[in-house]
Amino acid sequence: MKKILIACIVFSALSAYCQPDTSKIEQYCQLTATPRLLSNKVTIDIDFGEEKSYWNDERLRTVKGKVKKFNTIIDALNYMGQHGWIFINAYPVHLAGTEIFHFAFKKTFNRTDFP
């Protein structure tokens, strides 16, 4: 009888810790828009905070697997908004006569979505 009682206590204690983690975490990213040489288009780079490598192609891709290209800065901002990213701040940086725009975004995820 004691063994059954102890087993029930242990089982109930373990089941209390099995509840899913529903806490939220905010993640941030930065979108950088650089004007292309001799063109009115821009090059968009989105930094999600992952490690960069020259050996791996980490560019943003479409559902079909092609590299995602944006026509304008507004096109890239609309893309971020459609995917749930919330705009925080924007600032320009002047380098060698060109103006590079930086945009900061944030998004809330479930903590269980991240290792």
Image: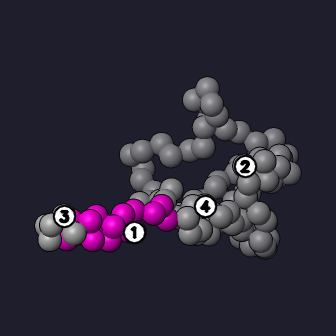
Asked which secondary structure carries label 4, the reply is: strand
Few, some or many C-alpha atoms within 10 Å of disc 3 (few <14, some 14-19, many ≥20)?
A: few
The answer to whether residue 97 is visible is: no
What residue is drawn where x is 78% and y is 48%?
A: 82
In the depicted structure, whether residue 109 falls above or below residue 61: below
Mark 1 crowdedness (10 Å alpha carbons): few <14, some 14-19, many ≥20: few
Work out whether residue 56 or residue 13 is closer to the camera in this orientation and state it: 13
Q: In the image shown, does 103 or 114 lie closer to the viewer?
A: 114
Inspect the image, locate mark 1, and give the three-letter code of the amino acid beneath it.
Answer: Ala
- Residue 77 position, x and y percent, is 80, 54
Instruction: Tell me the residue at 56%/44% (across/down).
Output: 59
Mark 2 vs mark 4, foreground winner is 4
Q: Which residue is mark 1?
A: 16
Considering only vertical position in the picture, is 55 above or below 84?
above
Could you tell me how many numbered marks the image carries?
4
Q: Which mark is residue 83?
A: 2
Q: Which mark is residue 4?
A: 3
Specify the amino acid type for callout 2: His
Q: Say which of 3 and 59 sits in front.
A: 3
Q: Which element type, helix, strand or loop, lies under badge 2?
A: loop
Q: What secondary structure do most residues of the magenta stretch adopt?
A: helix
Q: Residues within 10 Å of mark 4 (few under 14, many from 20)?
A: some
Residue range corresponding to the magenta coloring: 6-21
Q: Nearer the viewer, mark 2 or mark 1?
A: 1
